[in-house]
Image (spheres, rainbow, N blue to C red):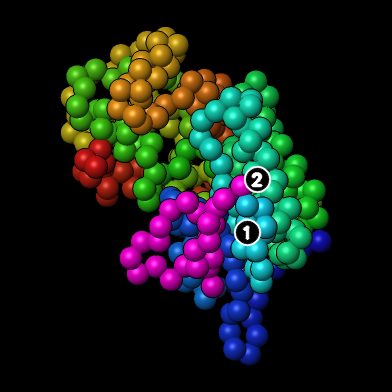
Amino acid sequence: MRWPALGDFEDGCGLVTTALVTGAFGNIGAAIAERLESRGAQVRTLTTRAAPAGSTIDVRPLDFSQPSVLASAFDGVDEFYNTYWMRTGDDSGYARAVEHSTMLLDAAAAAGVRRIAHLSVLHADDGDRYPYFRAKTQVEHVVRATGVPNVIVRPAVVFGGTSALLNQLARVLRKAPVMPIPGDGRYRVRPVHVDDVARLCVESDAALDSPPIDAVGPERPTYIELVRAVREVVGSRARLVRVPARVVAVGAGIVGRVTRQQLLTGEELYSTIDGLADSDGPSTGTARLSDWLAEHGRLLGRG
């Protein structure tokens, strides 16, 4: 069974779709919301953030301690865009993320939504050794079990918008004389622009049995090539030094505790080295990281 994309929901008065996006003021959530509003949808969000000035999004509280309030946010919703997740944790922590995701998806199905777009992660079902990936796979199964036509989109490395990854890398390159490269640096990544991820979520056909979509861009640099590209555009003279991955993981943890910012988790590092941020499949994104760096590189790492 196929369900139409958003643009097919029209009547004599135009588009009348109401779409609920979790985290519509975050990076990917904001890109999805913007695309939906540009197509005439009424956007609602479940979030813990206050709406920015001038926002027309209907804000509801993301409070898992009040299931009835959470469920009421889905009243009248046609499409559900689930970006909810937690970046760090362990098996017990991610179990809560799975539980919360299940609450959201069950509420969407009970309310009669006609389409679900769910944000997962590249190679979700190939990362059994990592709690993050195991939990993502569990939620994908929950999405399928709703019986609602759905599309599952799987990015890995996202750039553009307010994505923190490249900005944090640029900050280190601007300030540090030495940049550690975990391992040999020859493992590859498939960066995808945030707008391409949003497009795949909004415009892809939804079905009960459609395979997940790998959200990957047209370029496939090695990690050290990526660092060199960022170093060049920010004008850094930092020396790149290959060091054991475990040293980088420990160092990133220490810096994160000092700065109160999670720069890099061990799971993110080791899964990337294992190739889980890479794909040899066809590009589903159109934006090239090299072009984006050439345009935005001078601002990277300054804020």
* Above or below: residue 56 compared with residue 183: below
Question: What amino acid is at disc 2?
Answer: Ser
* In the image: residue 208, left or right of residue 22: right
Q: Inspect the magenta stretch and tell me whether residue 60 lies in it.
A: yes
Task: Check disc 1: other Cα within 10 Å, few if <14, some if 14-19, many if 20+.
Answer: some
Q: Is residue 73 above or below residue 242?
A: below
Q: Which residue is mark 1?
A: 69
Looking at the rendering, which quadrant does residue 125 occupy?
Answer: top right
Q: Earlier in the sequence, mark 2 or mark 1?
A: 1
Which quadrant does the C terminus fall into?
top left
Residue 15 figure quarter:
bottom right
Which label was assigned to residue 131?
none
Please indicate whether residue 164 sits to the left or right of residue 110 in the image.
left
Does residue 164 appear in this view? yes
Residue shown at 50% from the left, 68% from the top = 58
Quadrant where the N terminus lies?
Answer: bottom right
Q: Secondary structure at mark 1?
A: helix
Query: Which is more toward the observer, 275 or 48?
Result: 48
Q: Position of residue 160 (x, y in %)?
A: 38, 48
Report x, y in % for residue 147.
81, 55
Above or below residue 79? Residue 297 is above
- Magenta stretch? 42-65
Q: Residue at x 35, y 37 (%)?
A: 166
Q: CA distance from mark 2 to mark 1?
A: 15 Å
Residue assigned mark 2: 101
Graded by Cα atoms within 10 Å as few (under 14), some (14 to 19) or many (20 or more), the crowding at tag 2 reads: many
Indicate the amino acid at tag 1. Val
* Residue depicted at x 65% and y 85%: 11
Looking at the image, which residue is at 26% across and 27% down?
172
Residue 157 in the magenta stretch? The answer is: no
